[in-house]
Amino acid sequence: MKIVILAGGFGTRISEETDFKPKPMVLLGSQPILWHLMDSFSAQGFNEFVVATGYKGEIIHDWANGLDSNWSITPVQTGLNTQTGGRIKQIFDFLGSERILVTYGDGLANVNVPSLINFHESNKRIATVTAVRPPARFGVLESENGLVTSFGEKRQSDSGWINGGFFILEPEVKNYILSDDEPFETGALPRLVNERQLMSYHHHGFWQPMDTLREKRILEEMVLNNRRPWLDHHSNE
């Protein structure tokens, strides 16, 4: 099964890093986050990648062509202003009728891919999304009549579940994407829900997006300290 990585967005929320390169090429240590993501899949035996590019896509194309690895990397230019739904639709057109795993190129997680695939197959729906709890960002404050009674760090388990990416999609999902201008998250996914075709695989392990400089530094510190929890695929369920 091929791993499809969405890597075409503008990355405007971390523009300090993305003015001159696409977000998946932001370095964590000596390698871009895109490499760390591929490394995580490769550690589980998945080495075929299709990268949906857009903004400054030529940088990813050049990097992939020059990379010395045993990975098969096929960058596909899917358009500068194409939304996530359109990028997925174009990749389905490019690959033909086969199941794919789709994820975002700006985050890392230790999702156990064989377990995710088994879950998808056992439920016999055409799409599965990985549900995660968002990383804790703010302190929790409780009060009574204005008097603070408790103050502490917000725990991940205090939050609800959100879309963590890592989709397993059958080729029929292409029919739920109407145009290049449509985000997958607000277009195809609600339609799949309405037809009871979307399953949710709950991931309890490590998951960390890179939407801000603060989050980039969190991941970079892990790399520099040789602590890479996204490679530990046995402690995530």
Image: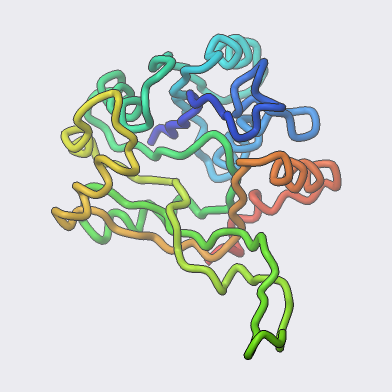
What quarter of the picture does the N terminus occupy? top left
Q: Quadrant of residue 16?
A: top right
Residue at image location 24% in from the left, 60% down from the top: 123
Residue 90, given in percent of the width and then of the height, sits at 30, 22
**Residue 2 vertical placement versus 51 (above, below):** below
Residue toward you, 148 or 155: 148
Q: Of all residues shown, which one is farthest toward the right?
A: 225
Residue at image location 44% in from the left, 46% down from the top: 166
Residue at image location 29% in from the left, 31% down from the top: 182
Q: Quadrant of residue 17?
A: top right
Residue 139, given in percent of the width and then of the height, sits at 70, 69
Residue 217, given in percent of the width and then of the height, sits at 77, 43
Residue 177, given in percent of the width and then of the height, sits at 22, 33
In the picture, measured across the screen, residue 197 lies left or right of residue 226, that is left
Q: Of all residues shown, which one is farthest toward the front?
A: 145
In the picture, measured across the screen, residue 111 lies left or right of residue 192, that is right
**Residue 53 vertical placement versus 209 (above, below):** above
Residue toward you, 69 or 107: 107
Q: Coloring scheme of the render?
A: rainbow
In the picture, measured across the screen, residue 10 lies left or right of residue 88, that is right
Residue toward you, 114 or 126: 126
Total marks in image: 0
Residue at image location 65% in from the left, 27% down from the top: 15
Q: Quadrant of residue 93?
A: top left
**Residue 164 vertical placement versus 23 (above, below):** below
